Image (spheres, rainbow, N blue to C red):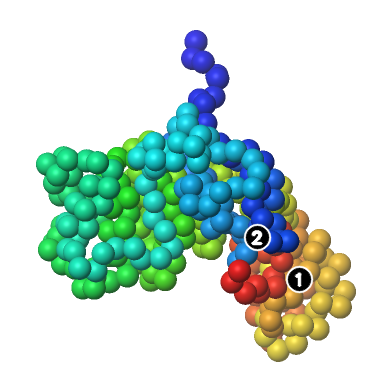
Amino acid sequence: MPSSIAPAPLFEVSHLTKRYGDTTVVDDLSFQIAPGECLGVIGPNGAGKTTTIRMCLGQSAPDGGSITALGLRMPQDALAIKAQLGVVSQMDTLDPDFTCAENLLVYGRYFGMKDATIRARIPTLLEFASLTSKAQAKPGELSGGMKRRLSLARALVNDPKLLMLDEPTTGLDPQARHLMWERLQLLLQQGKSILLTTHFMDEAERLCSRLLVLDHGKKIAEGKPRDLIAQHLEPDVVEVYGNGALTLVDSPLKDLASRVEVSGETVFFYTQDAKPLLQALSAQPLLRTLHRPANLEDLFLKLTGRQIREDA
């Protein structure tokens, strides 16, 4: 009879806290990452996502709490942990003076790998990144998507068990994002674990087996994407826009929805059953409507608000 005991976490954060002056940017945060799992961390600007990543990498010391990775403790065993991690940061950290192949070679040396071992891995890594034809090109000759894929290939040079990706597809066009997603899905199929921060809700829903929602440094929700949507939201959303849409907020139509929100010139009706609302709206042909199921973006906006925040 197969065992039902869950495997030990590959990575575990317990009661993590970080302060800058009087501001607490990470507040009593706890989470785990299981082997082969992609944990997504989402939240508005200033929610504490990047600070959390920095502490997980030993780049910033926590003011409280503990981090355990691969059976070791951060920051005491930082070097041993980093030897088994792969990192793709928000900023491009490729060396512009080296070719793609040389970037991989030099990075592998940081882990104490022998040149022969690294050189043997380079063709496979470049093929994985769809950059075989660019082996002798320098980063300045690459598109944004190519650079991100090279950064991902570089993060794999030491064959890490866990990848930490901080907004890896920011600034990419849709085609480049989709190619990046395909590569990340391949890594998950190979049994790699991923900690992913992102502002793209479709990316989070596509890649992540679990989500952690942060706001003001606190964990405000955690779970599988579809479970969180079902737990926090009505199943149907009707978006109404066009001349006169905003007048609907105080009209009898609001009683046909569980919740009504406004963003710009669009009115969002959240409802358990959209049929009565859609029927009533059909009598107003000047208005345009979009009926869709609730999604992760709706969850994000409900939990963290629609107000735009400046970068923290």
Q: Residue at x 67, y 85 (%)?
A: 242
Badge 2 marks a residue whose secondary structure is strand
In the current view of this chain or complex, which residue is farthest to the bottom?
A: 243
Residue type at tag 2: Tyr
- Tell me the residue that label 1 is attached to: 261
Residue type at tag 1: Glu
Relative to 216, is 82 above or below?
A: above
**Closer to us: 296 or 217:** 217
Instruction: Tell me the quarter of the picture where residue 99 sits.
Output: bottom left
Instruction: State whether residue 179 appears in this view.
Output: no
Q: Is residue 267 left or right of residue 157?
A: right
User: In the rendering, at what x and y percent does residue 210 appear?
Assistant: 56, 44
Q: Is residue 282 left or right of residue 155?
A: right
Task: Find residue 85 and name its label.
Answer: none
Using the numbered discs, state the Cα–Cα distance from disc 1 to disc 2 in whole angstroms: 35 Å
Instruction: State whether residue 288 appears in this view.
Output: yes
Q: Residue at x 37, y 38 (%)?
A: 84
User: In the rendering, at what x and y percent does residue 157 appear?
Assistant: 26, 46
Instruction: Tell me the quarter of the picture where residue 139 sits.
Output: bottom left
- Tell me the residue that label 2 is attached to: 20
